Amino acid sequence: MDPVEFLSKLEKTTIMAVEFDGGVVMGADSRTTTGAYIANRVTDKLTPIHERIFCCRSGSAADTQAIADAVTYQLGFHSIELDEAPLVQTAASLFRDMCYRYREELMAGIIVAGWDPRRGGQVYTVPVGGMMTRQPVSVGGSGSSYIYGYVDSNYRPAMSKEECLKFTAEALTLAMERDGSSGGVVRLAVISEQGVERQVILGNQLPKFSTV
Amino acid sequence: MSEELFPEPEWLSEEVKTGTTIIAVTFDGGVVLGSDSRVSAGEAVVNRVMNKLSPLHDKIYCALSGSAADAQTIAEIVNYQLDVHRPRTQYHRTFNKDVILLTSPDDNVVVKQKKKQHLHEIGHILNAFEFDKAWDRTVLRKIKEKVPHDLSIEVEDDPLVCSAATLVKNISYKYKEELSAHLIVAGWDKKKGGQVYATLSGLLTSQPFAIGGSGSFYINGFVDAEYRKNMTKRECQEFVVNALTLAMGRDGSSGGVAYVVTIDKDGAEEKCVLGNELPKFFDQ
């Protein structure tokens, strides 16, 4: 199966998360399609799992919503038992356990990102199949294949929060321009010690590139 | 018995594909073409140094992708068809700008000029038909009507890139169902300068730049963001090498070395960038 065919089996989407010193920036497009019809053009694909841990969902919407609900429950319980904020790695491990155990039945590609006091901002990716790995920057969804080159060339370690926001918005815009299944607005979330800030970049405010 | 011990490798029966990355970009004054060098049959790499930039004419090249056999065949056919644009009689080069009209044997009038006459006398000219490139095409048409049918007319002019691309497109479209190859045609001609044509599945479109092959999906975002109009030749070459490197880094079917061809009014220059000379990007 060639890469575009494989990735196109995922929920038509583009999701991305980047670490910076002090937190993470997460972004997603806002289109949900059923066939050629756009069922929802302002979807929110950034789902809270805990106070400072979010996940970006791609793949079957039903599967990812069910997994996210289950993990939210398990993490909430774990956090109360511990009496402190859970680690991002814990959340990612819970996602991974479920995605791996039920890998035959599920079609879910998830990026887990957040901030915890022990390790700061972290991004973990749990792609289809159920592996888990920590990456400074991670992209996912059907639109992600178009921006691997852009992300590889433009990412630098130790970017500031504003630079990360700009980088994410530009990468998502490029993917949305090329992937018919991604589009709408760009939803961004910044998670840091102070909490969560959410932004929306509307269509006419998206960065412009030289049109070919 | 020996077949069980040494089973025939799977790749021998796999179709040979150039899972590839190809790119062509115009700059002010010419074009730059680039390609990787990997040819795969299934999971095996059967050629790691193949040059996928194939010349169609002196200043027109095409980049191959898709099935290796199909792409090479199309390129060879079009190369042959464009050969009609080559001067066959080398020693005519001394009188580039004059018209030689060979009259019928009954006529006593011959255009006389010393050098040509000498050649004529010693029998070096059998058939000659040349005209100034700046002449209006209508003159050629008028002359053609008077010329006997068994005389072959050869055009000394370099072909237009558009013509080469159209020839490629015609083959791709006619045999659309049987072939699976995508060629990008790029070159330089006097009329429009550097041009790039994409001929995927039999369409023909002129673009400032074009990318193709399996590896091109990964660099769509990169080229959209980084391409600027009116780059210099140097910037364009760097842009092509960067794009190829990024694609080879992510696509399993692209790799090896990068071949780069730069075409401008002075001709075509081929270059090969080895693996260790390729630029480095962030890699965890």
Image (tube, coloured by chain):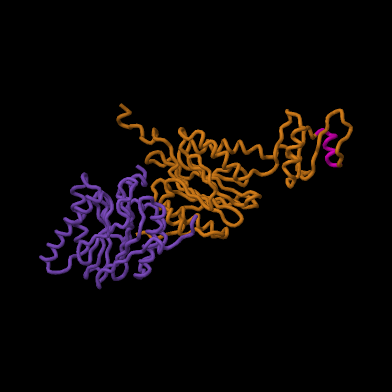
Q: In the rendered view, does A135 fall on the left or right side of B215? A: left
Q: Is residue A66 above or below residue B151?
A: below
Measured as percent of width and height from the top left, residue A181 is found at: 35, 50
Residue at 61 percent across and 36 percent down: it is B81
Seen as rendered, the residue at the extreme right is B108
Measured as percent of width and height from the top left, residue A15 is found at: 32, 57
Q: Is residue A34 magenta?
A: no
Q: Colour of chain B?
A: orange
Measured as percent of width and height from the top left, residue B30 is found at: 60, 53
> Which contiguous range is marked in magenta?
B114-123
Seen as rendered, the residue at the extreme bottom is A194
Of residues B42 and B100, the one nearer the viewer is B100
Q: Quadrant of the C terminus of chain B?
A: bottom left
Q: Is residue B117 magenta?
A: yes
How many marks are shown on the rendered structure? Answer: 0
Q: In the rendered view, does B53 fall on the left or right side of A196? A: right
Q: In the rendered view, does B191 fall on the left or right side of B185? A: right
Residue at 25 percent across and 51 percent down: it is A61
SS majority, magenta? helix
The part of the image, by quadrant, that contains residue B245 is bottom left
Residue at 44 percent across and 57 percent down: it is B222
Q: Quadrant of the N terminus of chain B?
A: top left
Of residues B218 and B139, the one nearer the viewer is B139
* The chain in purple: A
Of residues A116 and B272, the one nearer the viewer is A116
Of residues A124 and B11, the one nearer the viewer is A124
Residue at 20 percent across and 50 percent down: it is A100
